[in-house]
Image (tube, rainbow, N blue to C red):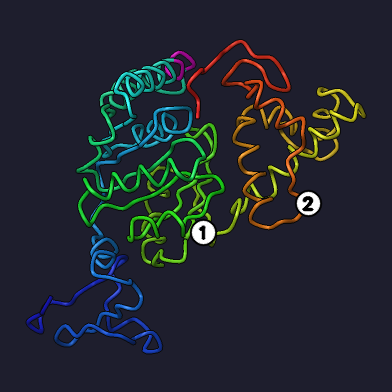
Amino acid sequence: MKDSGNIILRLFFNRTVSEIPASIKKNNLQTGKDVIPLGLFGNLATLRICMNGGKIVKIGVIGAGTMGSGIAQAFSVCAGYEVVLCDVNKDYAERGRAGIRAALDKLVEKGKMTRTAADAAAAAIHTGPNSAASDCGLVIEAVLENMDLKKEIFKELAEICGPDTIFATNTSSLSITELAACVKRPVVGMHFFNPAPVMKLVEVVAGLFTPPELVSRVSAIALDIGKTPVEVKDSAGFLVNRMLAPMVNEAAGILAEGLASAPDIDTAMKLGANHPMGPLALGDLIGLDVCLAVMEVLYSESGDPKYRPHPLLRKMVRGGLLGRKTGRGFFEYQAVDKKGC
């Protein structure tokens, strides 16, 4: 890392090192005329990740359930991306790809996508076990909301992926900092919303060890696939779920108390608060297991009783009434995605 005086070392977004404020130029690495503030990155592996400003073209998605498949589809419809959809069992991954193919076909039938575009998107998706993501530039973990499971996956990825690979997680509430600590390299939150191909928002979450440059780079990737990134610091529930999950939880409490029926609760919020969807139907769409997981994280992290999950929510999850993906939650549905995550 030594220049000849003519080579200017640049960080992502073409900022020269000389443009970094002097106030943060501490614990420096001298490179000829330019100085790299290592304190900003933590280690050289992180520095390489942040400086590799070329477009990432190969995306790995770990978990082929509802969210993982949706994220894979969101990337596949954008020209220039190749997606590897992974799961512990390749059959699960293949089923996820089949679901994406069906979703693309429906878009063609509705006139929202050309057959050529749908075929190109489907062709951009490959499947395999988690090890198939070893050569991807960005790997997004999208498995169940279980910290131990996520840690196992990131440890596996740390062994098979190169030092320049960006590790991201689609967790809706768990600690980015804790995940990064288990692999001793940066992890960034890249929280998509269900249905991922449709919903525009992506929460880009910075943990304690996530460099600002990495947050900027992942935000740029989100923009490139037509999403709107919102940057947020690591905290239980992040932004949306910290507000949304308690609303679903409170609606479950109102239903349990018999104050109103499920349809009337949702109608009241749609007409009285101008919400496009009522809280109970929204909970079914998200997945009641996910709603419960978020509430449990909020409650355990804060200790505030306002975040205590309602017994009805717990009972429904224990009974397998998870919402749309199981065919029944607060309401009943015909389409069933038995493997949704």
Q: In the rendering, at what x and y percent does residue 188 appear?
A: 42, 55
Side of 335 relative to 272 (left or right): left
- Number of marks drawn: 2
Of residues 19 and 63, the one drawn nearer to the viewer in this rendering: 63
Q: Who's the residue at 41% across and 15% down the image?
A: 102
Considering the whole magenta stretch, tell me its main secondary structure.
helix
324 over 213 or under it: above or below? above
Tell me, yes or no, whether the highlighted magenta stretch contains residue 47: no
Residue 32 percent location from the top left of the image:
14, 86
Mark 2 to mark 1 CA distance (whole Å): 28 Å
224 up-or-down from 120: above or below: below
* Residue 83 numbered mark, or none: none
Say few, some or many: other residues with alpha carbon within 10 Å of mark 1 (under 14 / 14 to 19 / 20 or more): some
Looking at the image, which residue sits at the far left?
A: 4
Quadrant position of residue 335: top right
Q: Which residues are magenta?
A: 106-110
Q: Amino acid at mark 2?
A: Pro
Q: Residue furthest right?
A: 259
At 34% from the left and 29% from the top, the residue drawn is 87
Residue drawn at point x = 40 percent, y = 61 percent = 216
Identify the secondary structure beneath mark 2. Answer: helix
Viewer-proximal residue among 117 and 332? 332
Q: Is residue 47 left or right of residue 276?
A: left
Q: Is residue 121 left or right of residue 291?
A: left
Which disc, if any, is residue 231? 1
In the structure shown, which secondary structural element does the residue marked by tag 1 occupy? strand
* Label 2 sits on residue: 305
Residue 219 percent location from the top left of the image: 42, 55
Disc 2 crowd rating (10 Å Cα; few below 14, some 14-19, many 20+) is few
